[in-house]
Image (cartoon, rainbow, N blue to C red):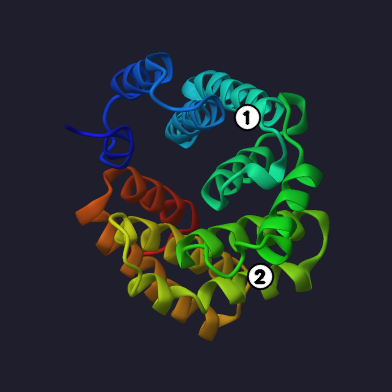
């Protein structure tokens, strides 16, 4: 049976993705916090898809609003943030960091969750390398936007150093997560490096796209869109 994550990765229609997400949510097979986060993730997966054309942006806004609402419900239902898994913190922090304040985004909350998970949690040294890398990327992105450029570069550099560990990771979605890390780190340093740094970044981006064409139509579409914006030949 095709899972919800498979439907998202392979860019199934929004209707199919949301039907599967709601089916799982209503089934009661997953505990409340996890089911809320699952719904939020499904909504969020469709946001960038609708941001590529101005006439579809209202749909992106609606999906982001719903993603934030489910995250808020999950945080209320959770006995404490310490009870959340590393993967759940990753999803929550990403959505809170990406959503604008008028839709319920909260960068301060996202930074607090990420700092705790990355540096204070008892599980900080046992989380999967790709989860740690994605958290570092989200934290770095927030820091860049609030003016902490050095912190942002430090955390993106730390994420880049985890690429080899992600390649060796024993997880079913290793290659898909590697695509996310390679593309995010590559685009960050492409935008903020000199010519030599851009050359290395383009190699990472091309590698991410080549892998995405095999394992994730959704990520391949996003990478091509970002490359087109920057006039990067891939």
Which dot marks residue 145?
none
The residue closer to the viewer here, 70 or 219, is: 70
Distance from disc 2 to disc 1, alpha carbons, whole Å, reads 25 Å
Q: Nearer the viewer, residue 135 or 102?
A: 135
Q: Residue 153: horizontal and vertical position, in percent?
A: 68, 73
Say above or below: 126 vs 214. below
Is residue 138 shown above or below 155?
Answer: above
Q: Earlier in the sequence, mark 2 or mark 1?
A: 1
Question: Residue 109, how many percent across, how many down?
Answer: 78, 43
Query: Does residue 202 appear to the left or right of 145 in the view shown?
Result: left
Question: In the rendering, at what x and y percent does residue 229 appear?
Answer: 48, 51
Q: Which residue is depicted at the point 70% across and 42% down?
A: 81
Q: Nearer the viewer, residue 7 or 189?
A: 7
Residue designated by label 1: 71
Q: Which residue is mark 2?
A: 155
Vertical arrangement, residue 53 with respect to residue 94, above or below: above
**Crowd class of label 2 (few under 14; some 14 to 19; many from 20; radius 10 Å):** many
Residue at figure coordinates x 57%, y 65% from the top left:
188
Tag 2, which secondary structure?
helix
Q: Tell whether label 1 touches label 2 (CB within 8 Å).
A: no
**In front of the other: 48 or 104:** 104
Q: Residue at x 42, y 52 (%)?
A: 228
Quarter occupied by residue 132: bottom right
Q: Residue furthest top?
A: 26
- Report the side of 112 relative to 37 (left or right): right
The quarter of the rendered structure image containing the C terminus is: bottom left
- Quadrant where the N terminus is found in the figure: top left
Q: Nearer the viewer, mark 2 or mark 1?
A: 1
């Amino acid at each position: 049976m095709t899972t919800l994550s498979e439907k998202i990765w392979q860019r199934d229609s929004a209707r199919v993705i949301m039907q599967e997400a709601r089916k799982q949510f209503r089934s009661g097979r997953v505990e409340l916090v996890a089911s809320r986060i699952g719904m939020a993730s499904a909504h969020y997966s469709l946001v960038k898809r609708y941001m590529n054309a101005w006439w579809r942006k209202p749909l992106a806004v609606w999906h982001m609003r719903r993603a934030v609402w489910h995250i808020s419900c999950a945080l209320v239902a959770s006995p404490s943030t310490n009870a959340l898994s590393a993967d759940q913190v990753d999803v929550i922090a990403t959505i809170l960091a990406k959503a604008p304040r008028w839709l319920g985004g909260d960068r301060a909350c996202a930074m607090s969750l990420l700092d705790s998970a990355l540096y204070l949690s008892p599980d900080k040294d046992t989380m999967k390398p790709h989860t740690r890398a994605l958290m570092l990327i989200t934290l770095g992105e927030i820091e860049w936007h609030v003016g902490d450029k050095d912190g942002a570069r430090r955390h993106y550099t730390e994420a880049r150093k985890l690429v080899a560990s992600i390649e060796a990771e024993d997880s079913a979605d290793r290659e898909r997560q590697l695509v996310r890390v390679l593309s995010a780190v590559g685009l960050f340093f492409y935008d903020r490096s000199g010519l030599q740094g851009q050359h290395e970044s383009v190699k990472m981006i091309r590698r991410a796209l080549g892998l995405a064409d095999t394992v994730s139509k959704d990520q391949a579409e996003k990478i091509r869109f970002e490359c087109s914006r920057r006039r990067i030949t891939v």
